[in-house]
């Protein structure tokens, strides 16, 4: 069974600090996604990572993928308040059909 | 262009009643997904439609849940004889390709009293 675990589940950080959110998955997967969800809003796609060693960056967020360790990280650099949201990772694998399997999410609160 | 839209945005119903949730995907997107998000949890896959192929219903939690899609347009998710554990946000997503990036709608927040 394909399972996804994120940690931490809740992260409170000061503006200007760096931190990393971790996403582990149980079996090999085809692709890994990071999504952002603001309170009361829907999910916004941030990154899609396809291969081992893939790294993508957008602003203060950088995502990487280690398929051998079945691990993805979302690194936050010099956090700002606007980054406060819930971040989800999700994976898919053809053998499991067309669905995405999501982690529980990491609630990020950046304090001014 | 317009994104995925869902209606209603909120629904409060009594236990035992049936509810119908609607999803309008992005025009031209052939793939459509329904997910459920319980409070404080990640999304659970419910059902997937791709063109005229038979839907993947493997995530539907019980036979009280059903969904339909007309061609490559609107989809409706129906929950019969609602139970309190059905309370959740129901999210719809569409994709231009099978297994392409999924674009999510704002969700329908369902509360079963």
Image (tube, grey):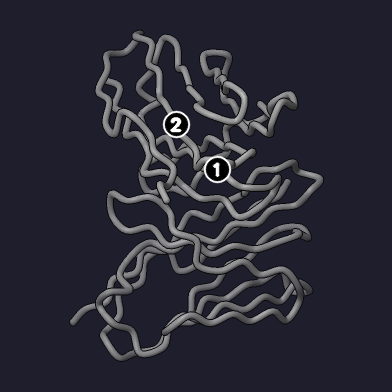
Which residue in the protein does label 2 denote? B23
Which residue in the protein does label 1 denote? B94
Instruction: Give coordinates of residue B103: x percent, y percent.
Output: 51, 50
Mark 2 falls on what kind of element?
A: strand
Q: Are marks 2 and 1 on the same chain?
A: yes
Residue at position x 49%, y 74% in the image: A21
Quadrant of the image occupied by residue B44: top right
Instruction: Give coordinates of residue A22: x percent, y percent.
Output: 54, 72
Which of disc 1 and disc 2 is earlier in sequence? 2
| Residue B38 to residue A80: above or below | above
Instruction: Give coordinates of residue B66: x percent, y percent.
Output: 55, 17
Q: Quadrant of the C terminus of chain B?
A: top left
Alpha-carbon distance for marks 2 and 1? Answer: 9 Å
Subunit bearing disc 2: B
As rendered, which of A45 and A84 lies closer to the eye? A45
Q: Residues within 10 Å of mark 2 (few under 14, many from 20)?
A: many
| Residue A111 to residue B30: above or below | below
| Residue A102 to residue B68: above or below | below
Q: How many marks?
A: 2
Subunit bearing disc 1: B
As drawn, is A65 to the left or to the right of A42? Answer: right
Q: Are marks 2 and 1 in contact (CB under 8 Å)?
A: yes
Residue at position x 57%, y 23% in the image: B69
Mark 1 falls on what kind of element?
A: strand
Instruction: Give coordinates of residue A92: x percent, y percent.
Output: 69, 53
Residue at position x 30%, y 91% in the image: A16
Residue at position x 47%, y 47% in the image: B104
As drawn, is B42 to the left or to the right of A108? Answer: right
């Amino acid at each position: 069974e394909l399972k996804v675990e994120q940690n931490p589940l809740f992260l409170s950080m000061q503006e200007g600090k760096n931190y990393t959110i971790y996403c582990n998955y149980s079996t090999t997967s085809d692709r890994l996604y990071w999504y952002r969800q603001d309170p009361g809003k829907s999910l916004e796609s941030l990154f899609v990572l396809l291969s081992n060693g893939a790294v993508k960056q957008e602003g203060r967020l950088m995502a990487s993928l280690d398929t051998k360790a079945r691990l993805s990280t979302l690194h936050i650099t010099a956090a700002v308040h606007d980054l406060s949201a819930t971040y989800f990772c999700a994976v898919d694998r053809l053998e499991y059909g067309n669905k995405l399997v999501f982690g529980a999410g990491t609630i990020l609160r950046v304090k001014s | 262009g317009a994104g995925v839209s869902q209606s209603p945005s909120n629904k409060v119903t009594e236990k035992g009643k049936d509810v119908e949730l609607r999803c309008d995907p992005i025009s031209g997107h052939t793939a459509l997904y329904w997910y459920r998000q319980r409070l404080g949890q990640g999304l659970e896959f419910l059902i997937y439609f791709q063109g005229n192929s038979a839907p993947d219903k493997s995530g539907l939690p019980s036979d009280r849940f059903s969904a339909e899609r007309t061609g490559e347009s609107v989809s409706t998710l129906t929950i019969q004889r609602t139970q309190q554990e059905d309370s959740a946000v129901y999210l719809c997503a569409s994709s231009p390709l099978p297994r392409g990036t999924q674009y999510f709608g704002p969700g329908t927040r369902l509360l079963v009293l």
